[in-house]
Amino acid sequence: MTTPMHSTPSEPTVAALGGGSLAARMRRLLLATRPAFAPASLAPVLVGSAWGLRAAGRFDWEPAVLALLATLCVHLGANVLNDVADDLSGADRGNEERIFPYTGGSRFIQNGVLTAREMTVLGAGLLGTAALLGAMLATLRGPGVIVFGLIGVALAVSYSLPRIQLVARGLGETAIAIAFGVLPVTGAAWLQSGRVDARSLLVSVPVGLWVAAILLMNEVPDRQADARAGKGTLVVRWGIPATRALYLALHGAACLAFVLAAVLRLIPWWSGLPALALLPAAWRAAGAIREPTDRVALARSIQTTLALQMAGSTLLLAAVLCATFVR
């Protein structure tokens, strides 16, 4: 999911991605969605599906696969539409401090690989595909699926939609924590077990907080461009010291929720210990949130934050499966 500093890919160009063949066009469309970041939204569905298995004592593959695909389409569609919104506002066009491929958008519009209209059509098509998958899920599990789907799509779209643009109002982390943390975990669990309760909500909390930490860290190198464009992210609003404290608080709260789940015996009592081992890496990553900015250190911290989300989600998934199958 992350890319070592010495092999960071170059920005997309017409020379590298041009061509009129079907294969060339499909490659452009795929790369414009920033697929390398897809695991960040797939991991919550896996955790939720595992929890649903634990709660129900059985597992249905069909709704689980449909949920994975629908969540993936929402995530990739949101990525594309966010690029369009940030180009319209000037946040990406004027971003000279970006750290590609992590911040500053996909650069497909700015580098002329795809037009804003083509990106809009792509994003809308992905959300439409997610809606179709949701309709298929509704035939399997009833109209409750529509509620989960509408909330997820609404959050994904309003995150960057002009006039609403939750991220510009300092609400981006909250929206992302719900849309790509709490919602897919509890929704996937509901698809298997038919219920949402306090236990599934607790299991979803660490995943949502780890996802929010990714967004917060990614906003740090973009803060000057965002401020010039009037995009009031939390980093722009709160400044560097408070952002560093919030980043640590997110990781601390995620591990606390993980340990609480272990204390309550929702997962094995010992499974909270590996989660605590993530905190030193989070502390080191937070060290790059400072003035003056060190771009190399920030890139490494972004990579670390992505890895922490995947490692934490994997540990949680393993803990839930152990609670299910290991007696």
Image (tube, rainbow, N blue to C red):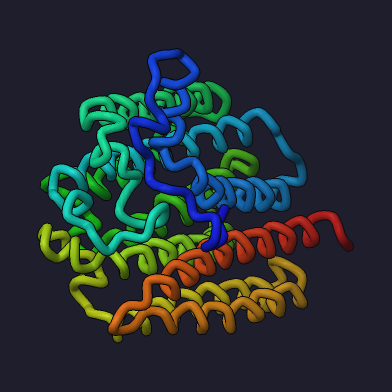
Q: Is residue 186 visible?
A: no
**Quarter of the image holding residue 245?**
bottom left
Q: Is residue 113 left or right of residue 232?
A: right
Instruction: Please give the name of the residue rendered at 52% of the width and 72% of the height, measured from the top-left corner.
Output: 254
Q: Is residue 233 left or right of residue 312?
A: left
190 to 104, vertically: above or below: above
Residue 150 x/y as whole percent? 35, 37
Instruction: Give the camera-side residue of 229 and 295.
Output: 295
Residue extending furthest toward the front: 15
Q: Quadrant of the C terminus?
A: bottom right
Q: Is residue 278 left or right of residue 27?
A: right
Instruction: Please give the name of the residue rendered at 36% of the width and 67% of the height, measured from the top-left corner.
Output: 216
**Quarter of the image holding residue 83?**
top left
230 to 115, vertically: above or below: below
Instruction: Please give the name of the residue rendered at 59% of the width and 41% of the height, measured from the top-left corner.
Output: 194
72 to 285, vertically: above or below: above
105 to 205, vertically: above or below: above
Q: Is residue 102 visible?
A: yes
Residue extending furthest toward the top: 21
Q: How many marks?
A: 0
Residue 27 x/y as whole percent? 47, 27
Residue extending furthest toward the right: 327
Instruction: Give the camera-side residue of 173 and 305.
Output: 305
Q: Is residue 37 left or right of residue 114?
A: right
**Quarter of the image holding residue 226?**
bottom left
Residue 175 x/y as whole percent? 33, 56
